[in-house]
C-alpha cells in the first residue's frame, strides 16, 4: 500500500530536466521551477537549519531556480553547487534507498558526510537515519535508475 502511495506522488511531482556537462544530479524536484520549495541549500550547511531563501538572491542551476538568504550564500552555491544541493535532486533519500521516488520535504533533512539529504515524511526520516551508511549506499545504487525514470517520464 505504501509503495502505491509513494509512487502516486511521483506523478504529481513537477520535474525539471537538464542534461549537460557537469549536471549529473538532476532532475531536480521543483515547485514552479523553484528547487526545494525556495529553501536556501547553503543554510543547512552554514546555519544548521532549514531557512527559506529570498527571490532577491537566486541562481539557476541544473534546470531549477535556487533561492538564498544572502548574496554570500548564493555565491557559495554558485562556486560549488554539488557541495550544497540536496542529493538525489531533492527527492526523498529513504524512498531512493527503497528504489522509489517521493518528493523531499525541506524541513526533514539530514547532513551526513557533508551531503544534504531530504526525506518525504518523519517516518521515512527515522528509517533513513536508523542506518545511514546502508541507506545512503542503497540510494546511491538506485538513484541512476530512478533518475533515468524521472527523465523518461518528463519527456
Image (cartoon, rainbow, N blue to C red):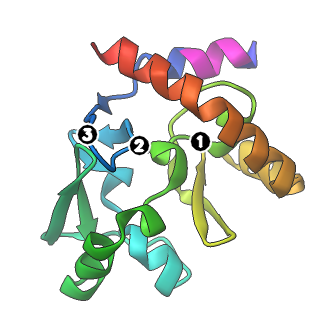
Q: Mark 3 or mark 1, which has the lower sequence index?
A: 3
Task: Confirm whether residue 69 shows in the render.
Answer: no
Residue drawn at point x = 24 percent, y = 76 percent:
74
Q: CA distance from mark 1 to mark 2?
A: 17 Å
Kindly report the secondary structure that dominates the magenta region of the rendered protein.
helix
Q: Nearer the viewer, mark 3 or mark 1?
A: 3
Residue to which mark 3 is pinned: 20
> Which image quarter is the C terminus in?
top left
Percent x, y for residue 148?
47, 21
Q: Which mark is residue 153?
A: none
Total marks in image: 3
Left or right placement of residue 37 versus residue 74 in this view: right
Q: CA distance from mark 3 to mark 1?
A: 23 Å
Residue drawn at point x = 43 percent, y = 16 percent:
11
Per the image, label 3 sits on a secondary structure element best described as: loop
Per the image, label 2 sits on a secondary structure element best described as: loop
Q: Is residue 145 magenta?
A: no
Q: Residues within 10 Å of mark 3 (few under 14, many from 20)?
A: few
> Which image quarter is the N terminus in?
top right
Q: Which residues are magenta?
A: 3-7
Residue to which mark 1 is pinned: 92
Percent x, y for residue 95?
67, 34
Amino acid at each position: 500500500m505504501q509503495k502505491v502511495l509513494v509512487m502516486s506522488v511521483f506523478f504529481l511531482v513537477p520535474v525539471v530536466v537538464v542534461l549537460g556537462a557537469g549536471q549529473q544530479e538532476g532532475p531536480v524536484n521543483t515547485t514552479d521551477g523553484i528547487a526545494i520549495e525556495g529553501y536556501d541549500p547553503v543554510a543547512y550547511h552554514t546555519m544548521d537549519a532549514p531557512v527559506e531563501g529570498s527571490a532577491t538572491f537566486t541562481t539557476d542551476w541544473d534546470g531549477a531556480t535556487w533561492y538564498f538568504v544572502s548574496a554570500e550564500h548564493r555565491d557559495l552555491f554558485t562556486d560549488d553547487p554539488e557541495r550544497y544541493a540536496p542529493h538525489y535532486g531533492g527527492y526523498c533519500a529513504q524512498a531512493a534507498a527503497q528504489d522509489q521516488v517521493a518528493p523531499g520535504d525541506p524541513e526533514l533533512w539530514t547532513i551526513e558526510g557533508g551531503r544534504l539529504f531530504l526525506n518525504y515524511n518523519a517516518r521515512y526520516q527515522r528509517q533513513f537515519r536508523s542506518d545511514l551508511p546502508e541507506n545512503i549506499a542503497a540510494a546511491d545504487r538506485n538513484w541512476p535508475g530512478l533518475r533515468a525514470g524521472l527523465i523518461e517520464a518528463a519527456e
